[in-house]
Amino acid sequence: MRESVTENPNPAVSARMADLDPSAPETSTEVPGPRGETPARTAADSRSAVRDSAFLRAARREPVPYTPVWFMRQAGRALPEYKKVRAGIPMLESCMRPDLVTEITLQPVRRYGVDAAVFYSDIMTPLKAIGVDLEIQPNVGPVIADPVRDFAGLEQIRPLDPEADLPFITEAVRQLTGELGGTPLIGFGGAPFTVASYLIEGGPSKNHEKTKAMMHGAPELFAALLDRLADLTVGFLKVQIEAGASAVQLFDSWAGALSPRDYQRHVMPHSAKVLAAVADYGVPRIHFGVGTGELLPLMAAAGADVVGVDWRVPLDEASRRIGPGYAVQGNLDPAVVFAPWPVIETKVREILDDGARTPGHIFNLGHGVLPDMDPDVLQRIVELVHEASAR
């Protein structure tokens, strides 16, 4: 595992890194794009290159020169250079510092040669921005000081004022789109149900007891909370898109805890509200959840262009369930990355074969990068995907 990566960063990023780490070496002047491409030289050329990128073409179910690949949670976690710049800085604070957000978002693009950057932030960022008392505790996750358990608790969730509450998001996205060249930037937000589960439980939960108790026992309160959170996520996504994000992903990480009937009745309308609110921007909308094999048709119908699939359902079967009008994203089991390389290669090729039988395929893990993954293995996966899928 390499200590750090300094190949061809943008000079502005180098200056930021020098501020973050006075010992940072002087570097050259270009951020490499996917497969070693250099960024376009003008803003117009960059926009054209982004529109014609393999990632966006796959999301639109158009022919691609090779299967594009990126990794959920690629910005951070396993990268030693990420750990170095984040040292001593709380998670949510790091999400509110544009220079740090820009550097961390660019790190995996340099390291892996992925086909898209994903904006470094957190699904809790909008809540923090409107003043909800929360923190992200290491090795625990989001912890809410005053969980929402009644209508009075809803008053914590005030309307978002994008200009006043999220100027750091706008600045970071603009910095990134100016430096990524032809590499698309994916914005994201938390789906109302997943964010609500943290607010109701007070933190992470395996069984979501309090969340489901409210959903069934106080449905009006539950719906009111999800409606407010939908508006919050809409505002968060719009800020990213208007600043230059080329696609967005709605994370509903805990939706797999629900039955299809409960999802359709209590959750789907609120996710659909989010996805519909950004439809007119014309950017691809990715909808992802974990353990959602039984929910895939509903998650597609909620308003997705691309449906994220975890490792439990083969991609061609997922595509059959949702129909031909959607691309799919996924779905290597993250645990496989710890296996010997011949095993990884076999699994990657199987997924590419499954993806070739769908209308459009974006290669990804079935969930996020794990902290102990070897970055060099992830880089080899990117190279393998590109080489094995070349048309």
Image (spheres, rainbow, N blue to C red):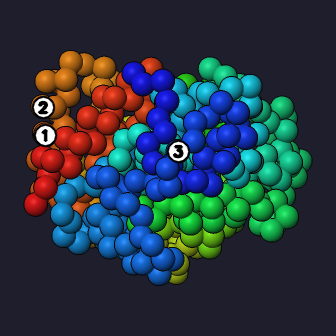
**Dot 2 corresponds to which residue?**
346
Residue 350, position as x, y percentages in the image:
13, 39
The Cα atoms of the two marked residues, 3 and 1, are separated by: 36 Å
The Cα atoms of the two marked residues, 3 and 2, are separated by: 37 Å
Nearest-to-viewer mark from 3 and 2? 3
Label 3 or label 1, whichever comes before in sequence order: 3
Element class at badge 1: helix
Foreground residue among 266 and 195: 195
Foreground residue among 15 and 121: 15
Check contact, mark 1 vs mark 2: CB within 8 A: yes
Amino acid beneath label 1:
Arg
Amino acid beneath label 2:
Thr
Element class at badge 3: loop
Q: Quadrant of residue 175?
A: bottom right
Is 39 situated left or right of 310 in this image? right
Task: Look at the image and tell me in which quarter the C terminus lies.
Answer: bottom left
**Dot 3 corresponds to which residue?**
27
**Dot 1 corresponds to which residue?**
349
Element class at badge 2: helix
